Amino acid sequence: MTQTILRSLADRDIPSDQFPIAWPQKTRELQSHHFDSTIWNDFQFRDDDIIIGSYAKSGTTWTQQIVGQLIFKGADDLPIAELSPWLDLRIPPKDVKLPEVEAQTHRRFIKTHLPVDALVFSPKAKYLYIARDGRDVVWSLYNHHANGNDAFYAALNDTPGRVGPPIEKPPDSILDYFREWLAKDGYPFWSFWENIKSWWDIRHLPNVKLLHYANLKQDMPGQIRQIAEFLEIAIDEAQWPAILEHCSFDYMKQHASKSAPLGGVFWDGGAQTFVHKGTNGRWKDSLPAEDSQRYETTALQRLGADCAQWLTAGYEASP
């Protein structure tokens, strides 16, 4: 309904500040081996905050790198994992994390993997949400999960405050992993479909911009300029070559310790495992056609035709 009203008023050239916007409201908490959504209840927004959302392994770190490069004007070797914390990760606990975030003096860019209804949503902030075909997500997620070391499992399972069952090592077969992830909607992490759909449904809001991994792969310079315009950040053209270099996969792979949490200590192979391939379509050589079709059927059922097509094709989403 809100989307229809916005379209109608836009067609009549009525400014958005002359009619009320139904801003999203938090309706639930999500707590698990990864999440503690209650931290958002105590987070104090600033007028220029940037929130970067995604499901997981969808280009989140890439988007954080882009935003960091825009804010810090092409600076080399930025510690993105420190500058842009994952707020709703329950480690470290919120009484440690919130003061650290409050102490930041730069324009803050915060990461979340929550669906919209588990967030406190602020009209003050700008929201970037990046998505990726779920089959690509799983192929990247499996590498992330299968290479987790003892420190990874100890941190997630043994740190006080965990709600629900522990996370366990994945099966040896990536096909078994994909099938269970699809059948149990994101298992053993969190729901894929509700995450995507919740952000798709608010794409009409003036402070929300949807991104797609495939679009970034196809035209990174164009996408970065769109992001800068949305965030109202003027690009220093003298630094443009440096921004592009520092947002390239090769650069991020070489400087992976700056992007991975704690420099990559939670993964066998370190930060180089965290920043892995950066490619799409790896599933096409190994995922049987019937499994791929099952995924596409589920996407259509859970997302609707427009959102499912966008998630697969990656064209620019517009209300």
Image (spheres, rainbow, N blue to C red):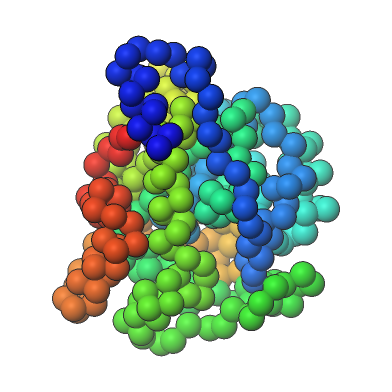
Depth check: 153 or 297 in front? 297
Q: How many marks?
A: 0
Which residue is painted at 39% across and 46% down in the image? 200
Residue 180 placement: quadrant? bottom left
* Above or below for 36 versus 290: above
Residue furthest toward the left?
Answer: 289
* Residue 177 appears in the figure: no
Depth check: 264 or 190 in front? 190
Name the spot of residue 113 as percent of width and height, x first: 54, 55
- Left or right, 317 with respect to 17, comes to left
Which residue is painted at 35% across and 19% down in the image? 10
* Above or below for 197 versus 205: below
Name the spot of residue 145 as percent of width and height, x first: 50, 73
Classify the position of the C terminus by image quarter: top left
Name the spot of residue 188 as percent of width and height, x first: 51, 75
Classify the position of the N terminus by image quarter: top left
Name the spot of residue 20 as percent of width and height, x first: 53, 24
* Above or below for 134 versus 257: below
Which residue is painted at 63% across and 62% down in the image? 30
Depth check: 272 or 174 in front? 174
Which residue is painted at 24% across and 74% down in the image? 294
Residue 227 placement: quadrant? top left
* Residue 119 appears in the figure: yes
